[in-house]
Image: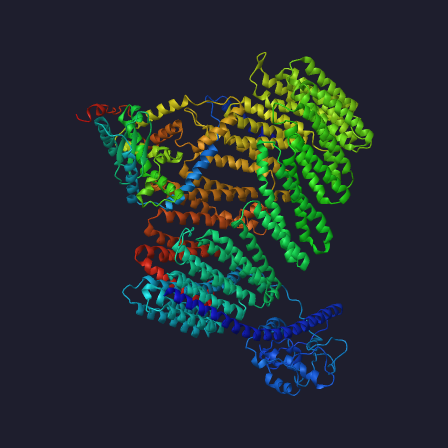
Amino acid sequence: MEFVVLAVVIVGAVLTIPVIAIIALARGAETRRLLDDATANSREKFLDLEREIAILRRQIVEISARPIQPVPTRAVDPATALRTPEPRAAAHTPPPAVAPFEAPKPTPQPAPPIPAQPARAIPEQSLPVTPPLAAPTNTTPPQPTVSQTSAPPVIPAARPEPVLNPPLAQAPIPPPAAPPLHSAPVAPGTTPAPAAPAPAPPPGPYYRQIQSPHFPAVEPGPPRKTFAERLRAVLPLEEVLGMNLFAKLGIVLLVLGFALLGRVALISMGPIARVALIYAVAGVMLGGGIRLEGRERYRLVGRTGIGGGWALLFFTTYAMYHVPAMTVMRSNMLDCMLMFIVAVAMVGHTLRYKSQLVTGLAFLLAFSTIALSQDTVYSLVAGVILAIGIAAIALRMGWFELEVFGILASYANHFYWLYRLFPYGVAGHSFPQFWPSVIILILYWLIFRISYIERTIRVPRDETISTIAALLNTMLLLVVLKYQATHPEWAFYALLGLGALEFLFGQLPITRRRRAAFVLLTVIGTLLIFAAVPFRFSGNNIALFWMIAAEVLLTAGIVQLEVLFRRLGLLAGFITGLLIIGEAQHLVKFRETSEAFLLKDGALLLTASVLFYINALFINRKWRDLFGDFDTALVTGQSYIGCITAFLGVWGLCTGDWTAIGWAILMLSAAFGVRYLDNKHLLFHAMALFVAVVVRAAFFNCDVVNAYPHRIPLRLATLPILAALFYVTAWALSCVGDLRFAVRSLALWAGTALLVALAWLELPPMFIAPVWMALAVVLVLVGRRLKLSEFAYQEHLLAVLVAMQLFAVNTSSQSAVERYWPFIGCAAAMYAISRLCTLKDALYRRPAAWVHTWAATALLATLAWNESPQPWLTAIWALFAVSLALVDRFFEVEELPWQAHVLALLAVIRAVTLNLYSLDKWHGIDLRLITVAILVAVLYAMAIWIRMPQSQRGSEARHAYTWAASGLTAWLLWSELQPIAVAPGLAIFGLALFEIGSWRQLRQIRIQGYIALAASFARIFFVNLTAATLPGELLGPRIYTVAPLALIYFFVWARLQSGKRKSELERWSPSDLIAYFGTGSIAAILYFQTPAEWIVVSFAALALVLLAVTLLLDQEVFHQQAALLVGGTLARGFAHNIFAGSYFGEGGWRGSFFVLSLASALLFAALPVAFKLRKRYADRTNITFLSLYTGLQYPEQVLFFAPILLISCVIAVKMNPGMVTLSWGVEGVAVIVLGLIVSQRSYRITGLILLLVCVAKIIFHDAWQLNERDRYITFIALGAALTLVSTLYGRFREVVRRLL
Amino acid sequence: MKRIVALISILLIAGGSLYLAQHRKRQDVVSVNAVVDAAADWQRDVTRVPMHLTRLSDEQESRIGNALTQQYVSAEPAENAANAAMERYLDEVGGRVAAHAHRKLVFRFHLMANAEMINAFALPGGHVFVGQGLLDQMTSEDELAFVLGHEIEHIDHYHAVERVQIDAQLNNLNLDIVAAVAQIPISLWQAGYSKDEEFEADREGLRIANAAGYSAQGAVNLLERWAHLHDEYVTHAETPPEALSQLAVDGLNGYFRTHPLPSERLAQAREVIAQDHLPLDNCLKPFHVEYEITGGEQ
């Protein structure tokens, strides 16, 4: 029985689709005709407007070029102006919507045979407000007109003009100069133009009306909006949210709620009563919506009501058979028919409003209600009906977005039904609803595919939306079919069949009229056919089938000159190549363990390589005209695939040490290809193969990994061969100026590298460095003779390698001969070739010579490092550096100062890394003290004696030595003093440096003093602040070691301030940091010395003191510190005293209330000072940014809001809950009174906000706490409130604004 | 001239400070405790804000504590007569001390008969566990009263239940479900609390133990013993690099360490004693060893 019903429904649906399609075609053709006419009309108007704009621009240029004449202005009553339009203004007056269709179609040529026509034609266009007058004149001449009588009342083409014109219509309108019907367009103040068309202006109905426009003077920009204005500007957003979104959500929830009501609630009510009830509700919603839709203010609510009503109506009809609790009929067929009728009525009625909102909402809710209630597969027939409806609407109205939604909803609905049956997928199990489900899915796909093919595209966006719909249709079909797959082996046939159908659809003539549809369906079909193959075949067979298909497509594309087929063929070939490469992975894995000969695989891969190279190098050249950029890219990609397959093929055929030789031959072949075919991609192939050869030679032929070389004879043979092949490749690529030059250089480097590696592998370690040095000498000499710069570079690298070899190997030799002579010999060789190590005309000849001498010096320094006693090496190097500096001072050898710098640096590093930690004694004296003191003295001396480079002689670069000396001194202080005494020591040292720097006017010394002071400040956080007071100590160590530091900081800061001008004092200076050190020290003492609960009070007191100091000294820095301390007070009060203090804190004078009240009182006590500061700094414009951000210009706000926040919060947390509201109220009143007293608006507003918070707390907290059961009631009430809010926003929005 | 006088004055003051510091009898430890303690304090303060706003009721806390205790006690070995007698002794001393707590919870005291467990901890709702190893270190009932007072105050001041709140928030547990409560590991409470909370428990525990009639000397003796033991393991840096490395290690340890240093706890105890004028009576109540022998039967 169910199958019969389903069959009937399907037949009905199949019969309905053509009917709907025919109707849609008929209506669509009519609409198209109207649209074409309207488009032509609009186009002409657009051209006219363009001409008008051009004239206006020209006139602007002309007017701006001559002096502006005064324009007589006259007060014009707007009503009069609108009532009595005159020709000139009429061009800018928006005509009614039907005006363009009532007027004759404007002709581009003037009409000279009828003299009256120009004058008459203009009012016909420009007098939209007087159609009765225009009508008689329009009847006389038989002019071509569009069929305006049959046009719908609203035509999109008629809308642009009213939209575009209002700004022009706002221009001043002069009084009418003549009756509109009998006067030519004459500008006031100018000579009336003759009726005949003037020769100068271009033809058109508008240009005459704008011959002499008036341009209003440029108005000043809009004034800056106040906060209230901005608030009012924001309010419309709330209107949008409240009236728009809430209304929609309300309707959605209402419909879904009634759907659930019918399904599960009201158990005592019978099915008939339920159906009647929900029908009644639907009727009310529908009727109410229709009634409200007519009123502009409630139009949105009305339309959503209509959509919701129809959705509820459809659901109820559906539920009469499919929802058990609402079943009132036994015939599924009858119910389907009723649903169909409802759907048709829904479509017809909602389309009356031409609103996607109404129609979309109806369908959305219909789908949703069905999803909530579907029980059998046959209930999904309702979805088919809705899909047909949506497709019909999409074709009829061109709302293709709606169809996308329909596709999503249809398949999602179906998937949801499947998901409820099989939450984890069907997974191959058979189920009885399989075939009905398949049929319904195919119907979905067919409906939306036919819609896609049939549609007419009006704008490009429609095609984009349609493409998305078409893709979604196929993708979702495949997804749902996959989910319900019971026979995975059918996937091949399903994909093949679906692909064939898509491909065939794409070749239909009706499809080919739209290129996008043809391309999309062809591509989808091809993809599905290709995707079907792996479901039945595997391995190379897939590649075989794909390759055949690719070649067929490529051939078809060349024969039929169809680029789509060619590209698909090329893409398929490319993918097939990737597949072949993927399949060749077993060759790579095989080579990991074996070097056996693989003839079959190698031959196959080489054959494929040849094929790909033929495609890339032959076909592309022969039919070059058919291949665009994209095709060429694909062909090029195939050439790379050919390179890879060749590489793999050679790997299969050549084994062991000869693999590198085979790849090198390929590389050489590619290089010759580059040379003779001039193909740049072959150069890339050669480069890739070059890398492969290098890697292979390094890791296999050279046995870098294998510790036991087994193929010495082969290595002795293959490495020279490879070197020779590299050199020949370099010759083949010899060309200057492009990438080949780089590859040639790399080949030369590779050849030499193989020779170097051969020496390294076969010679005893102690002789490697000398041999390399000899090879370097040979290379540089050959390079100078052949003028090959690469050989010179290779010599440089070899010299580096020689040095490394010496350091790494020869220094550890037990034999003095092997330790000294290689060093000395190589150093001598470097000195010898230092002036011959480059080409004669090389630009870097001098630096290269320097590097060689430096290397020699480094070798000698290293030798000294090896032989001298360790603790004294620092002093030796330092003295050596001084010696070099003195020698240079007398003989001016320019390299020596640099070497002195380096030696001094090494000495410092040596001291830092060794001497500073030495605890040894020398004749009872601390060795650390002696050696570091010598170094410090040398460094200060070198700062005076060293000869700096010419470019640095005027700078302070020599102070690097003083920095090092001061740093070492500080380190000595740290090492020698007790931990708690380090901070005072550093502070005294910093003070000394500061004074010396000031006395000798040495800025760097002063900076070193600042650093020492900063270090002393940092040091207190590591020892001094945590030092415990010992029994018997009258004054705690925290105080007597930190407080003097604060004195030093303030003294230095005061000294820095003394020489400044007033303008400098008003700028932020880094020296202010020292003042921060001083205050920070005091604040730190307070933090660590005061009990935790009282820190907040101490901070507040310090802030008060600092504000007073600010007032006395007029120094912004102390205000900044005060503001930061206020912030600290606030944060500390919040975090510790309010939330983190003891839950059972003490009352009385040690309780939270008292402590925070005291802190707040201290802050309030600073208010008078703050008001004086505000008066001082309010008008000062050059305050620092830090002062700006710490509220220097409004300190009274900072000092007011901080305690207010503290008090409010402590009331909320610590007060009895029942008293909180009252306390806040009292506080609010007090704040308002304070605001009134001091005339501060912000204070008063704060009080008002506090009172508002009280009200909100009563409503949202207290009331809820009193009644638990009100939660459910609240939920309902919340919904009603939302609706009420959305209505009130529309009804009383002006009142709300006034309240705000 | 003024500048020179001021400079000389400051140099004299700073030099005096340097002299005093250099010749101080105690070598102070270089550490980042100042910064770390401040950071830890702030972190604790900040994390207590949400705890404060999501406070559990006493009934919820008791229910959770009972569930946790049931889970833990069932895993302990069966009691014998001596252990039962010791538990009664703990109940007697603990009940005397707990009578002075702020919250009127039902406090119960459990013995963990493990000689290697030198620890005590408290669970939410009023359950206090004391290890046998810790009891073995005690020489007077006053010391036991201080330890029990310390643990009682962890419960009393919501330290224990805040662990539940934090763990419930971190692991998204529904505390109305017993199975969810059982997921919370006991080690959360065995690991101890933040330094601030430990100080607070010390301070308040000392006070309620004293209010229960026990001498503050017990606390002093116990803390002095621990401080002495701790000092044996402390090393001082000899060079700046050692100080730097010690800074890094101590900094991390200091931030994550739970109990404060015994010397700090001892200093606070002395401070509380002086502040509250608590009598330091050397006549301490003896630890009732006979409970272990006779089972409490006189």
In the image: residue B270, left or right of residue A398:
left
Q: Which quarter of the figure is the N terminus of chain B placed in? A: top right
Q: Nearer the viewer, residue B51 or A1262?
A: B51
Q: How many marks?
A: 0
Q: Position of residue A574 (x, y in %)?
A: 63, 48
Q: Is residue A456 above or below residue A1170?
A: below
Q: Position of residue B239 (x, y in %)?
A: 53, 22
Q: Is residue B215 visible?
A: no
Q: Is residue B124 above or below residue B236?
A: below
Residue A1077 lies in what quarter of the image?
top right
Q: Which quarter of the figure is the C terminus of chain B placed in? A: top left
Q: Position of residue A754 (x, y in %)?
A: 70, 28
Q: Is residue B90 above or below residue A863?
A: below
At 77% from the left and 43% from the top, the residue drawn is A676
Q: Is residue A963 visible?
A: yes
At 41% from the left and 21% from the top, the residue drawn is B232
Q: Nearer the viewer, residue B118 or A990?
A: B118
Residue A869 lies in what quarter of the image?
top right
Q: Is residue A1076 above or below residue A330?
A: above
Q: Position of residue A213 (x, y in %)?
A: 69, 74
Q: Nearer the viewer, residue A533 or B215?
A: A533
In the image: residue A731, left or right of residue A265:
right
Residue A812 lies in what quarter of the image?
top right
At 55% from the left and 23% from the top, the residue drawn is A975
Residue farthest along the top direction in this orientation:
A923
Residue farthest along the front direction in this orientation:
A600
In the image: residue A435, left or right of residue A807:
left
Q: Nearer the viewer, residue B219 or A780?
A: A780
